[in-house]
Image (cartoon, coloured by chain):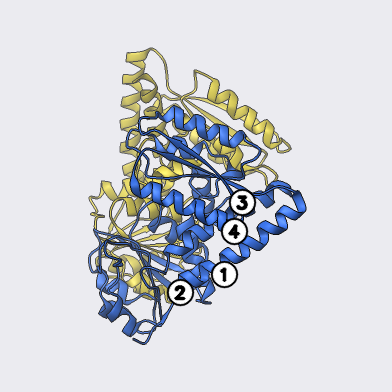
Chain colours: A yellow, B blue
Amino acid sequence: MTAALMDGTAVARRSLDDTRTRVSAYRETTGRTPRLATVLVGDDPASHTYVRMKVNRCRQVGIDSLRRDLPAESTTAQVVATVDELVADESVDGILVQHPMPGHIDERAVFDAISRGKDVDGVTANAFLDMANGHEETFASCTPAGIVALLDAYDVPLSGKHVVVIGRSSILGKPAALMLLGRDATVTICHSKTRGLAQFVSEADIVVAAVGRPELIRGEWIKPGAVVIDAGYNEGNVGDVAFGPAAERARLITPVPGGVGPMTIAMLLAQTVSAAEQRES
Amino acid sequence: MTAALMDGTAVARRSLDDTRTRVSAYRETTGRTPRLATVLVGDDPASHTYVRMKVNRCRQVGIDSLRRDLPAESTTAQVVATVDELVADESVDGILVQHPMPGHIDERAVFDAISRGKDVDGVTANAFLDMANGHEETFASCTPAGIVALLDAYDVPLSGKHVVVIGRSSILGKPAALMLLGRDATVTICHSKTRGLAQFVSEADIVVAAVGRPELIRGEWIKPGAVVIDAGYNEGNVGDVAFGPAAERARLITPVPGGVGPMTIAMLLAQTVSAAEQRES
């Protein structure tokens, strides 16, 4: 292996340390503690685990949390009403709506009920538009923001570089592509209908794999010296990139797990403190 | 010249004919006439010309129009109030806010005051998000929608094709890229910071030039047999593509003018009738 690892766990830990410091300073200045509200609908075990992880991390950095767990049979109107209450609640700085929600719920209506200042997960339509246009008045979607933060932590230049994003999901591939475009990369978006994926990948200075298919990206496709971000998660801790062979050619590569994953919560908590700070300013 | 012309004027005329037929049918069924409201702020001569062109085209296909011309010194709140009135006005089916508006106006606040059903120019944040995600509940931004309609009119296959978009503006390059991605093209977005633009263009099955720099795209860069959409407009009726040499290599190419330009108003009016029809359904 010739590539150096991009250690998301370590970068996330530094970010969480920084957040903890900011929380303390905020508390000293204002006398109050930043608070993240979570909204969870239904009984999906994975969603429960994610919310619990987020609440635990909040505690570790000194952020309060407020859970709103709603039954699976809740209507869209009921979930929206809960979000409305949290928007009105002066003690709440940020709102995280865990998704996916049960299929009968209009997720978009729920997301767009979150106010701009409390949308620390970057899920409103305005947040998406701002991100697409490089405006920073709203908060970014946490996983793509984590990818950019990880690249920045390793001083990977983005301007003028060719980034190939594999995957076009609305919560990962597309926002990652748009954020990297905003950082002046030339961006190609590939997906299941792309012909000649190997050729596209082989031309990339930076590969962002975000497709959720185990080892779809083969190591020999990677351009020597490229940077490889594997945001895929597949059963058995396997990423979207064949790690071993890719690490023979890449300059920098993320492990799975321990690459992009830990960055997501770190971004969420950093943005929650920012939301609290911005309310005071 | 070996390329065939993509005659936007002719395609737009067919679209307008179709719209006129739909307007008649709508009037017979409902007893009322579809109406487009235009909002124009200030004295910019080009903006006045654009609004006048749109109003004239409305008349030609039987759509009523309602002009709201506001002084240049109007505040954001005043322009939003005008939009709010038009949203509430039962006689109005679609709202077009001519932009750019004077610099002191918060365009985003004005755009987002337009209701989903009346946003026939596709300028709200929700319209952008829906377009990015391939949802068709809202109306598309008219110029990128016109590009896709022109490609469809010439039966250009998009799925799996490599589209290179040059330009990343929020009203043209980015939405065009996202719409073509939604049609299963593999999309590369190039811009002023791109290195090796010639190489990217030479690999494109379809080139969409939307950058506003006269003849930036040289004919010899075009892959033989490619399709070239020139959405650029520069003084002296010059596009972003060097037309003559490009036409020697392309299979299909848009003229400037008479390519993308006429499609924009045609899409606007088609979407206005759709807005009226959807209110009845």
The answer to whether tags 1 and 2 share a subunit is yes
Q: Name which of mark 4 and mark 2 comes first in the sequence.
A: 2
Mark 2 crowdedness (10 Å alpha carbons): few <14, some 14-19, many ≥20 = many
Residue A153: x and y in percent read 27, 46
Is circle 1 on the same chain as circle 4? yes
User: Residue A183: image x %, image y %?
Assistant: 29, 51
Q: Mark 1 points at which residue?
A: B14
Q: Nearer the viewer, mark 3 or mark 1?
A: 1
Q: In the image, what residue type sits under mark 2?
A: Asp
The chain letter for the residue carrying disc 2 is B
Q: Alpha carbon of mark 1 to alpha carbon of mark 4: how far?
A: 12 Å
- Mark 4 or mark 2, which is nearer to you? 4
Label 4 to label 3: alpha-carbon separation: 24 Å
Identify the mark nearer the N-term, 3 or 1.
Answer: 1
Residue B7's tag is 2
Vertical comparison of B108 with A248: above or below:
above
In-front residue for pair B21/B11: B21
Q: Mark 1 lies on which chain?
A: B
Name the residue tied to disc 4.
Answer: B61
Q: Quadrant of the C terminus of chain A?
A: top left
Label 1 element class: helix
Instruction: Look at label 4 and name its amino acid.
Output: Val
Left or right placement of residue A39 versus residue B224 in this view: right
Secondary element at image label 3: loop
Q: Residue beneath label 3, please?
A: B137
Disc 1 from disc 2: Cα separation: 11 Å
Specify whether disc 2 shares its chain with disc 3.
Answer: yes
